[in-house]
Image: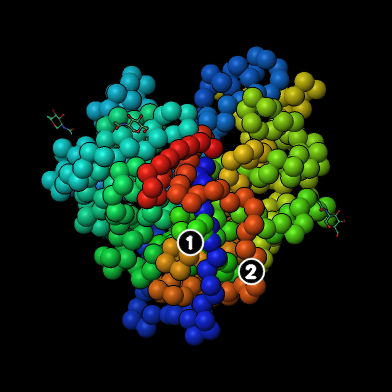
Amino acid sequence: MRTSVTLAVLAWLSASEALVLHERQDGAPRVVSMDIERTKLSNPLQRDRLRRRGSVQATLDNEETLYFLNATIGTPAQGIRLHVDTGSSDLWVNTPSSKLCLLRSAPCQFAGTYAANSSSTYEYVGSYFNISYVDGSGASGDYVSDTVSIGGQKLDRLQFGVGYSSTSAQGILGIGYEINEVQVGRAGKPAYRNLPSQMVADGLIQSASYSLWLNDLGANRGSILFGGVDSGKYEGELQTLPIQSQSGIYAEFLITLTGLKLGTQAIANSTALAVLLDSGSSLTYLPDTMVQDIYSAVGAQFDADEGAAYVPCSLADDSRNLTFSFSEPAIAVEMNELVLDLITAGGKRPTFQNGATACLFGIAPAGTGTNVLGDTFLRSAYVVYDLENNEISLAQTRFNSSSSSVKEITAAEIPGATAVTNSVTATSGLVGARAVGISAVGSGMVVVVAFAAGLVLLMV
Ligand SMILES: *[C@@H]1O[C@H](CO)[C@@H](O)[C@H](O)[C@H]1NC(C)=O
Ligand SMILES: *[C@@H]1O[C@H](CO)[C@@H](O)[C@H](O)[C@H]1NC(C)=O
Ligand SMILES: *[C@@H]1O[C@H](CO)[C@@H](O)[C@H](O)[C@H]1NC(C)=O
Ligand SMILES: *[C@@H]1O[C@H](CO)[C@@H](O)[C@H](O)[C@H]1NC(C)=O
Ligand SMILES: *[C@@H]1O[C@H](CO)[C@@H](O)[C@H](O)[C@H]1NC(C)=O
Ligand SMILES: *[C@@H]1O[C@H](CO)[C@@H](O)[C@H](O)[C@H]1NC(C)=O
């Protein structure tokens, strides 16, 4: 989900509080770990249209690759797949009796549904769950609470939404800041404990934090580790940067991008651009001028109707990296991570008029919207999201690593991470979010959240 919004600078922890590695003496680290799985959703109709035209055009909504994890809800347990989203903050699921799920095509079958009625541990919370999206779609219904199991650990009582009315076939696991819950923004109620926070309250983990390792585009599996860091999954050292707040509010995972390079060519120097880390966004969205420079350097063809660009698939063999600099570190994204396959219903690939096979390019213009580092960037990074200290720790990922060395994150400390000194504060790219947080889900879905003042709105 493209999300947007806010940031701030956290004063660095004093030396005594600095990031330090703690190993538990009493056995295994207290962490909750689980695999996540990448699934490609495709729309045959769109693909066919594309093939017939002989030129490249596809609808991104249907080209998304989403990361899911398996969970169970209720008693007895009902299995469900949840789309992992760092860009929103509510967990919500579909119910089998919604109009959407009852369609002949059974769209909810892949991700599964939750029938509150069939669970002996279900409790009603209120009928004010309502998430909406930029295209007018969304989900609404009840907030409820029930037993939720995830990664082999059980939470006896976790609040989440049930989409009695829904236009999204997948339930979503939003793991962002609580202030971005729609209960806060829409219903004007106090925040409830969402998953990371409930895990802390239940003693499953020590700190509201998690590490996300999406792994390679060529791999189908990555992992999420709540309350811990796995040093087997990244290269070098983790560097810790402050999340950027707006008007003192931490609502979104925004950090400062300080430079961008394609091979040795500078695309942007000395920027102080706020960018959102959003696992729910398949593509990366950057300022139009930067994107234009990248497109000319790689020969991408922009399709204004789709808001995205196509490249010959052979670009994947280009040896240049697209390197994103933060105060520290720099994360290199290899070209083959930016060239996404488009496969038609018949298993064919679209081609350009000259016959070259066409692929979707992983970077798109943000326009007036938020700048988002989505999955095409995130796969190349190991990212620790620390909600408790308002910090992000980053390192270059280690693709396909089977080595593992898990350490627990304690309340103020991320094992093996070094705080970046003199990190740059974002001066552009911040949405005027004084009172508003915007969080978009999936392509074009936007959750609207207003803080305090009652307002709200709109779209990315
Ligand atoms: C989730 O469960 C489905 C069905 O059992 C299985 O095919 C899939 O591999 C599981 N995914 C993960 C990430 O564990
Ligand atoms: C609960 O079950 C009853 C009877 O099966 C059904 O009529 C009702 O709509 C269900 N309620 C919900 C909230 O699903
Ligand atoms: C949810 O919010 C949208 C936008 O504010 C509104 O149009 C819609 O009626 C609401 N849905 C419900 C069920 O309250
Ligand atoms: C990772 O594994 C996948 C699947 O086996 C493979 O396609 C891909 O090339 C590997 N990536 C790297 C960087 O080795
Ligand atoms: C970035 O800096 C380099 C070296 O100082 C300069 O050659 C280049 O033109 C600059 N590029 C941009 C996009 O500002
Ligand atoms: C691109 O980045 C990868 C990952 O950091 C690195 O191994 C490789 O050497 C880089 N390639 C070039 C041409 O710089």
Q: Residue furthest left?
A: 120
Please name the colour scheme applied to the rendered image: rainbow
State the image quarter where residue 419 is shown: bottom right
Of 345 and 297, nearer the camera is 297
Label placed on residue 423: 2
Residue at x-position 51% and y-position 36%: 459
For ligand 5, tell me if the residue under mark 2 lies within 8 Å: no
Residue at x-position 26% and y-position 65%: 202
Circle 2 residues within 10 Å: few <14, some 14–19, many ≥20: some
Cα gap from disc 2 to disc 1, whole angstroms: 17 Å
| Residue 220 vertical position relative to residue 200 in the rendered view, above or below | above
Q: Residue furthest top?
A: 52
| Residue 210 vertical position relative to residue 265 in the rendered view, above or below | below
- Left or right, residue 307 beside residue 68: right
| Residue 355 vertical position relative to residue 284 in the rendered view, above or below | above
Whether residue 94 appears in this view of the structure is no
State the image quarter where residue 420 is shown: bottom right
For ligand 3, tell me if the residue under mark 1 lies within 8 Å: no
Q: Indicate the quadrant containing the C terminus: top left, top right, bottom left or bottom right.
A: top right
Residue position for label 1: 248
Q: Secondary structure at mark 1?
A: loop
Residue 381 x, y percent position in the rendering: 60, 58
